[in-house]
Image (cartoon, rainbow, N blue to C red):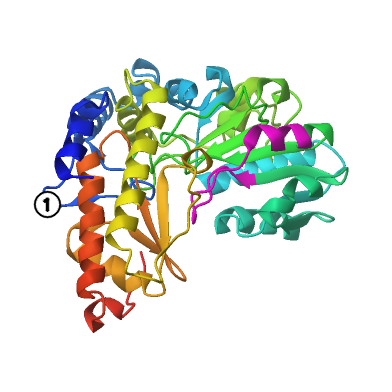
Amino acid sequence: MTLDEARALDAADPLAHCRDRFLLPSGKIYLDGNSLGALPAATAARLGETIEREWGESLIESWNKHDWIGAPERVAAKLAPMVGAAADELLIADSTSINLFKLLGAALMSGDRRVILSEEGNFPTDLYVAQGLEALVPGVTLKTVPADQIEAAIDQSVAVLLLTQVDYRSGRKHAMSALNAAARDAGALTLWDLSHSAGAFPVDLTGNGCDLAVGCGYKYLNGGPGAPAFLFVARHLHDRLHSPLPGWMGHADPFAFDPIYRPIGGIGRFRTGTPSILAIAALEAGLATFDGIAMSDLEAKSRSLSQLFIGEVEARCGGAAQLKLASPRDPSARGSHVVFAHPEGYAVMQALIADGVIGDFRAPDLMRFGFAPLYNSHEEAWRAAQALGEIFESRKWDSPRFTKRERVT
């Protein structure tokens, strides 16, 4: 593809105007939105308003006057259509890891089954949380199997199937609907981690028959570093499940200061402590970058960007015999990041970053390139592939400056 052809794709892009919703540094091509989303242009003003006008002027009255108390549900309602959930099935709260603990614990507490089934190589924190419950609750066992054996491993002993929809390394997507159906037939619940899904392409939690889900707010949702996470509990489970981390904000009458815990009905029972209002305000600004966007356009652009990049990299780096595509070639089978493997992947990525193309590396040999459809362009994908080709042609990466691993990001 020529540069003019890539620019023509951008000229016809229905999401091209969304780039102006972000503050992007000049001279850099940012392809790491799958780790930390770019800064929305409105975030600083939104935080300033929350700090100066709400906190500064209204002080404690802001809990009611500016609806701080309702922020976890109110902001969740803005996210709900993007992940195919009803507004009352979603909650902004805590971190992804804490939400995983709450929902895994709730699933285990709901019956007599004690097996958590997951995939070998699932995102480490997901497995760590499951291991923590394994050590904490007598009889609980974490069982992991290869991806192609998951469905066969779902049996009558499984309490909950814990999976990440998009693999953080390869970008491979699980067949969510089929696995939900298999778990349902076996009487097990499903818990999906959407950290590499939400905001990258449309997710249909309800349509796919999901029971539980979590996800983070700082990747494709552009909520800022350490942004609050979200959790999903299907409506039919609201009265059946109870949080293993009850707190006063999940009490039926929190300001009664009742010494005995009584959970509120609905998704609110999965609140624990006081919500982080400043962080939620930043996340709300991040979600506003999706205003007026059709999720089908988001998915189409994600595929267009990644397909262009794969094609250009393979055309320009054909002489790099050890460079291999580590993501599924079929765009419908992967999320919004593309992964290439190379034995010197760390050094290659450091050379790319030095040239202004920001991706990331995962040991032992994976170079990840995340495409955020709201702000990445086809020209950027083209130029990133061109830069990678030049690095392989010149062997620029073969330098102590790039091969010394002082810090892997």
Residue 156, percent from left and from top: 88, 42
Q: Amino acid at mark 1?
A: Gly
Q: Would you place residue 206 above or below residue 272 in this image?
A: above
Residue 371, percent from left and from top: 34, 44
Q: Is residue 177 magenta?
A: yes
Q: Is residue 49 left or right of residue 284?
A: left
Q: Is residue 18 magenta?
A: no
Q: Is residue 256 visible?
A: no
Taking depth in this image into account, of 150 and 312 the one nearest to the observer is 312
Taking depth in this image into account, of 396 and 275 the one nearest to the observer is 396
Reading the image, the residue beneath label 1 is 27
Q: Quadrant of the N terminus?
A: top left
Q: Residue at x 74, y 31 (%)?
A: 181
Residue 292, percent from left and from top: 32, 17
**Residue positioned most to the left:** 26
Q: Is residue 292 left or right of residue 252?
A: left
Q: Residue at x 14, y 39 (%)?
A: 4
**Quadrant assignment, res 214:** top right
